[in-house]
Image (cartoon, helix red, strand yellow):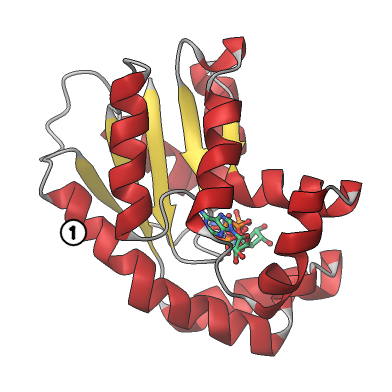
Amino acid sequence: MRLVLLGAPGSGKGTQAARLREHLQVPHISTGELLRAAVAAGTPLGVQAKSVMESGGLVSDDIVLGMLEERLLRPDAADGFILDGYPRNLVQARALDALLAKIRQPMDIAVQLDVAQDLLVSRLSGRAHVEGRADDSPEAVRKRLSVYEEQTAPVVDYYRNTGKLACLDGVGSVDEVFIRIVEAISPGKDVG
Ligand code: AP5
């Protein structure tokens, strides 16, 4: 199964991807996690990405695509993957299609998690207190949400037009949302 998880910051992509990884037995590939690891390791890419990420902006398309391509070509992704945090704009959506065509691994389904903005803000401010992620400050969260509206929301329409989009309610317990996703991606389910 090759699955793309879409949704605003705080919509639960990472939380659900961790569960889906166990359920589907394919790797969870998060571009945010790959970038945070590069920042923590102080690689040249991480040094370039750090301030953009902390401000809540998007890292350059070229950097993220190169990193993603390298990750998708690792053997553990040969039988599928859960992609979280990519694509984030239409340029990335088209680049992903081209990359997946090149490696002959077409995407099966995109799942969009819908959560109202006030709940997103409350989840992220809750995480700021617990984990202290640099981009969960109120200013960075505001910026991330506006970047999402302007640049990432159009990606949802892009996938709707392919007939491979399932839009799901992301509100409820983690278990409830997980069950919705599993039902939506089950074989034979019409997602168009
Ligand atoms: P990234 O790491 O992708 O962050 P994000 O999209 O902002 O997503 P989050 O991790 O904040 O939220 P999530 O939807 O995964 O929710 P989560 O499960 O964590 O990207 C970070 C940055 O990296 C970007 O801003 C950008 O700078 C850069 N970047 C990454 N990809 C890029 C790309 N492709 N191009 C360019 N730049 C890129 O949940 C959030 C909280 O809510 C948690 O505390 C969780 O416990 C809680 N929660 C989850 N589900 C529920 C539930 N059902 N009920 C109650 N609480 C819940």
Ligand 1: which quarter?
bottom right
The residue depicted at 43 percent of the width and 72 percent of the height is: 148
Residue 46 percent coordinates (x, y): 78, 54
Residue 139 percent coordinates (x, y): 66, 89
The residue depicted at 30 percent of the width and 33 percent of the height is: 98
Q: Where, quadrant-wise, is the C terminus in this rendering?
A: top left
Residue 190 to residue 73: above or below: below
Q: Residue furthest bottom?
A: 139
Between 160 and 64, the residue placed more toward the observer is: 64
Residue 143 to residue 36: above or below: below
Which residue is denoted by mark 1 in the rendering? 157
The image quadrant of residue 149 is bottom left
Residue 154 percent coordinates (x, y): 25, 65
Between 173 and 104, the residue placed more toward the observer is: 104
> Can residue 174 be spotted in the picture?
no
Say few, some or many: other residues with alpha carbon within 10 Å of mark 1 (under 14 / 14 to 19 / 20 or more).
few
Residue 112 to residue 132: above or below: above
Element under label 1? helix
Between 191 and 133, the residue placed more toward the observer is: 133
Q: What type is the residue that disc 1 sits on? A: Asp
> Can residue 122 be spotted in the picture?
yes
Q: How many marks?
A: 1
The residue depicted at 42 percent of the width and 45 percent of the height is: 5
The image quadrant of residue 49 is bottom right
Q: Where, quadrant-wise, is the N terminus in this rendering?
A: top left
Whether the residue carrying mark 1 lies under 8 Å from ligand 1 is answered with: no
The residue depicted at 55 percent of the width and 83 percent of the height is: 143
Residue 90 percent coordinates (x, y): 29, 58
